[in-house]
Image (cartoon, coloured by chain):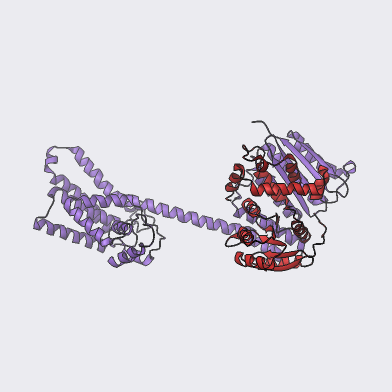
Chain colours: A purple, B red
């Protein structure tokens, strides 16, 4: 462990001081000492000795240790520390028991030599500490175990470790109550209750803690997986399908349209206009409309929107009318490109659909085209707007739509 | 917009794009009417090549590793070259477009432009005019929204009514000639208007423009 500390210590010399995080890879109990050593740039073993000395002196070290344990976050699981090291150092039951026995031996030695700080506190704290360490050492090892009681009831996991750890803490409580004879003489049942609560907290905390940690780990894992799945699904539905279509398509014009549509979609995707949001705003709705016409009619639709507005019912009607006009231009003008321009101003939304195609004489239009023009004009008028069609043979066509906005 | 392939013979063009395939495509499209004097795929190569070949017009990709189109313009300007830049991009992201114009490009067209239109645009930039694609016009109208706050310098921070009108027509898909006939002015006057707009776009420090730009992660 000291070697690991040296390596980590030398790593930090050049860079800025690392955050105080409990170490995953280099830990005896909770990785607090290694974390502090790493943070301060000193040997973890020095920190450990300091903790032991402070603990012996007045129990102060234990308090600091527990506080640091609670306050310092665990270093991220995917940090640079090699995985193998973490697995190696993770205390097993044997190691935890061994450490506990060594600790007990040291304490016993101190007790015998007279360097001691109080019967009634030392044993309960030691027992409780060992029990807590044992519980912690095993918590979180079994995936999916969320609560000790649950584990016990379902009978899946009830190991000797848990039993030993819990018994040690319970024993500590009993010793504490027995040792503090003066308090017991006071006959305070309140104290007993407090001690019981404290003991239970000690038993339950490791599970609660590891459960929280697992939940966070799991959530971030899930978010990553979902993002990847979504990306894969999107690329499959769009890019891969389009590539397949392009390979089979004999029509150059169709290929161009496919490629352009795909480019538009992919760009919307990459630059953050998620499909879920499309349609919520006027700009997105116009873009979506343009993409649709492009796909269906195999023309280029250059859609430009200045400003933006919420897509209420009237704005929706405008989008439909613009879509109708665009479709019309794509179908009948013979032009390969349609320009759509929408401008949102304070008092009105204006929309222009223009092509450089054949054009026609509005005075002598065929009845079917008259019908389409009517559907555009009629739709706009129903929503309090206007629409007019400007065209002349050979000069292209432009449909101008205007929708007054309600004054807020 | 089937622009007539105006005789652009003699205009020397340098092509900068990090996509080899696209570069060779543009070269073959332009070689019928222009003199291609070189191409480059990185900012460094481009700056060195442009300074050496001294072309009339540089066709410049906006998105490139290590500095992008802006880096090329700044590097070439620092070396004192007088070449004009026409930005050519597959990305229609506002920050790219406004950014490259503010760096000094004289126009912006998308890569979906037809060969004839591209030749016409190169010629126009060579003639000292600016090239406003409909999309660029839309971005400018958005950035210079009429209802914005107090201008610091009205000369630079506001579009005139006439300029606004001309931009609107361009955004609607009108050619300069069509704009001229709609507004009953000469094509030269339309060009003057859009040149003025480009100058404002490059020089204005108006709060609204910087805010608009930073909303789109620019500046």
**Nearer to us in this view, B198 or B4:** B198
Q: Which residue is drawn at 20% across and 53% down?
A: A55
Q: Position of residue A278 (x, y in %)?
A: 63, 47
Image position, residue B83 (x, y; %): 69, 61
Q: How many marks?
A: 0
Measured as percent of width and height from the top left, residue B66 is found at 57, 62
Which x, y percent locates residue B56?
Answer: 73, 62
From the viewer's perspective, is B207 left or right of A38?
right
Q: In terms of depth relative to the viewer, which is nearer, B179 or A305?
A: B179
Res A306 visible? no
Q: Nearer the viewer, residue B132 or B24?
A: B132
Query: Image quadrant for the N terminus of chain A?
Result: bottom left
- Residue A127 appears in view: yes
- Classify residue A389 as left or right of residue A8: right
Residue found farthest to the right = A364
Above/below status of A314 relative to B53: above
Q: Which quadrant is home to the C terminus of chain A? A: top right
Residue at 13 percent of width and 46 percent of height? A179
Picture quadrant of residue B164: top right
As drawn, which residue projects farthest toward the top?
A: A407
The furthest residue to the front: B80
Query: On screen, A126 above or below B34?
Result: above
Residue that appears at 67% across and 39% down: B146
> Which of A69 and A47 lies nearest the eye of the viewer?
A47
């Amino acid at each position: 462990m000291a070697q690991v500390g040296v390596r980590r210590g030398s790593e930090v010399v050049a860079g800025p001081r690392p955050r105080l995080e409990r170490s995953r890879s280099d830990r005896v109990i909770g990785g607090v000492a290694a974390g502090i050593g790493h943070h301060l740039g000193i040997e973890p073993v020095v920190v450990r000795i300091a903790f032991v000395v402070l603990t012996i002196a007045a129990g102060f070290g234990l308090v600091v240790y527990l506080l640091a344990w609670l306050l310092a976050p665990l270093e991220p699981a995917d940090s640079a520390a090699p995985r193998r090291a973490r697995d190696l150092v993770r205390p097993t039951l044997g190691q935890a028991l061994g450490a506990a026995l060594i600790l007990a031996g040291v304490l016993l030695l101190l007790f015998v030599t007279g360097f001691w700080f109080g019967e009634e506190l030392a044993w309960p704290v030691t027992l409780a500490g060992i029990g807590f360490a044992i519980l912690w050492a095993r918590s979180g090892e079994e995936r999916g175990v969320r609560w000790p009681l649950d584990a016990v009831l379902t009978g899946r996991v009830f190991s000797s470790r848990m039993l030993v750890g819990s018994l040690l803490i319970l024993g500590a409580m009993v010793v504490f109550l027995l040792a503090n004879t003066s308090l017991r003489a006071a006959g305070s049942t309140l104290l007993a209750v407090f001690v019981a609560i404290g003991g239970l907290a000690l038993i339950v905390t490791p599970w609660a803690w590891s459960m929280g940690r697992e939940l966070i780990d799991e959530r971030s894992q899930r978010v990553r997986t979902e993002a990847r799945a979504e990306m894969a699904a999107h690329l499959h539905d769009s890019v891969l399908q389009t590539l397949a279509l392009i390979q089979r398509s004999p029509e150059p014009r169709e290929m161009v349209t496919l490629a352009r549509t795909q480019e538009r979609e992919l760009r919307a995707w990459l630059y953050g206009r998620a499909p879920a949001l499309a349609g919520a705003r006027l700009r997105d709705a116009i873009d979506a409309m343009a993409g649709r016409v492009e796909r269906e009619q195999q023309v280029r639709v250059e859609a430009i929107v200045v400003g933006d507005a919420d897509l209420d019912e009237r704005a929706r009607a405008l989008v439909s009318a613009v879509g109708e006009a665009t479709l019309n231009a794509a179908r009948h003008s013979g032009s390969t490109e349609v320009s759509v321009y929408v401008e949102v101003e304070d008092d009105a939304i204006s929309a222009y659909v223009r092509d450089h195609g054949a054009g026609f004489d509005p005075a002598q239009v065929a009845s079917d085209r008259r019908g389409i023009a009517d559907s555009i004009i009629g739709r706009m008028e129903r929503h309090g707007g206007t629409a007019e069609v400007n065209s002349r043979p050979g000069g292209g066509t432009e449909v101008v739509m205007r929708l007054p906005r309600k004054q807020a | 917009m089937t622009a007539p392939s105006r005789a652009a013979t003699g205009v020397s063009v340098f092509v900068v794009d990090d996509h080899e395939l696209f570069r060779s495509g543009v070269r073959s499209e332009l070689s019928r009417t222009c003199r291609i004097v070189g191409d480059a795929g990185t900012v460094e190569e481009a700056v060195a090549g442009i300074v050496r070949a001294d072309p009339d017009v540089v066709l410049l990709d906006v998105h490139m590793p290590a500095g992008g189109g802006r880096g090329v313009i700044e590097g070439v300007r620092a070396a004192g070259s007088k070449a004009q830049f026409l930005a050519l991009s597959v990305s229609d992201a506002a920050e790219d477009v406004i950014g490259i114009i503010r760096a000094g490009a004289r126009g912006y067209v998308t890569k979906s432009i037809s060969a004839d239109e591209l030749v016409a645009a190169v010629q126009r930039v060579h003639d000292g005019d600016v090239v406003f694609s409909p999309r660029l016009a839309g971005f400018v109208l958005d950035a210079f929204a009429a209802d914005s706050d107090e201008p610091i310098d009205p000369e630079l921070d506001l579009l005139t009514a006439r300029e606004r009108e001309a931009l609107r027509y361009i955004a609607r898909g009108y050619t300069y000639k069509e704009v001229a006939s709609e507004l009953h002015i000469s094509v030269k006057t339309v060009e003057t208007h859009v040149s003025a707009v480009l100058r404002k776009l490059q020089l204005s420090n108006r709060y609204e423009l910087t805010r608009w730009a930073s909303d789109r992660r620019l500046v």
